[in-house]
Image: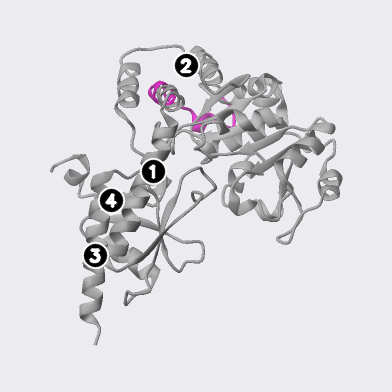
Amino acid sequence: MSNFYSKLGVATVINAADSYTMIGGSLMPAEVIEAMADAGRYFVSLEQLHLKAGERIARLTRNEAAVITSGAAAALTVATAACMTGADEAKAKAWPLHESSRNEVVIHRCQRNGFDLAIRQTGATLVEIGDAEGTIAEQLESALSDRTACVIYFDTVQFAKAALSLEEVIRISGSKGIPVVVDAAAQLPPVSNLWRYTEMGADLVIFSGGKTLRGPQSTGFIVGKERYIAACRLFVGARNSIARPMKVGKEEIAGLVAAIERYVNLDHAAMKEHHERLVRRLCEGLNRAGWLAERVYPGPTGQDYPLAHVKPDHSACTAEQLSKLLLDGTPSILVALTPDQQGLALNPLHLNEVDVGQIIARMSELLDEGQNERP
């Protein structure tokens, strides 16, 4: 079937991996696309639209306030800058800030990752606490000072092992009046995460709009306390600020609001069963074909859905080689590797029944081919 991508000679893939930016995040449902098309028919005040859309998102997510950004990485920049300046518009315009300003961001050493750049590009200095073995409360307490803009916490299972609990970080930082910013970009489902972190006491919480929510990929949003969201607003929209290159279009704003409204109103129990059914079918079909497949839980960063892990024990190739064969084949299938890199991790989040059938058929073919090639 001819489509925009085939006309350009760009291959499409079945996404059995995750909501990866490198393949477009997720697929937008009809109501999101319609909202974007409708928004594109009119001119509006971008500042007013940001304000009203933020109010709507705050109500939908049971939060005090919210602001839209051009993705979760941009939200890290906006949140950091907001914590550095507060709601002082003069400071927001006077970038870079003077060296005597609040320009330190405290972060667990075990949580350092590639998104650090979104924090550091504000000019903030990262102050590390703990190490790969663990972190103690005294290390956080001693790192906090009158130069601390905020503490940033990445809440995924990969970063939890050697870190203080989020509850303890909120307690210690809150006792000194220092805001805690939680990066929960991919932490959906469950839907309750949209308000759980702020109910715990986090000041700002970041989510991606283009992952599980299935909004425009180039959107994200921050929820939290009004005083801090008010500071974030100084860095979004048409304002000249450090985040001006990260502005969000009116169409994307409309799409994100529609995506959040759709998501919070889903039948989440039915969606959970849908994910379980797809994983069950994957495991049963692949095991019948001769693979070793099993259901594992939770999702890749701790989300509330299962995965199918497949071991290539009966194959003539490694997991990495097998993933390349799947990606290079017809249909092209993108899969992730298990944490130990020894197997495939098949994610149901963006699959449907047809996709599952194609995955089982293709992997059956590869197993047969591999067995036929053995001496």
Query: Where does residue 92 sit, x and y in percent of width and height?
Result: 66, 26
> Which residue has dot 3 on it?
364
> Which residue has dot 1 on it?
275
Q: Amino acid at mark 4?
A: Val
Query: Would residue 94 be visible to someone looking at this image?
Result: no
Outermost residue, left side: 1
Alpha-carbon distance for marks 2 and 1?
38 Å
Horizontal relation, residue 16 to residue 209: left or right: left
Name the disc covering residue 49, or none.
none
Query: Where does residue 22 sit, x and y in percent of width and height?
Result: 39, 48
On whether residue 250 falls in the magenta region, the answer is yes
- Sequence-first disc among 4 and 3: 4
The answer to whether marks 2 and 3 mark residues whose Cβ atoms lie closer than 8 Å is no
The residue shown at (86%, 46%) is 142
Secondary structure of the residue carrying tag 3 is helix
- Sequence-first disc among 2 and 3: 2
Alpha-carbon distance for marks 4 and 3?
12 Å
Specify the segment rendered in magenta: 240-256
**Mark 2 or 3, closer to the camera:** 3
Work out which quarter of the rendered image holds the N terminus and state it. top left
Name the disc covering residue 46, or none.
2
Answer above or below: position of 258 versus 369.
above
Q: Tag 2: Cα neighbours inside 10 Å, few (<14), some, or many (≥20)?
A: some
Q: Amino acid at mark 2?
A: Leu
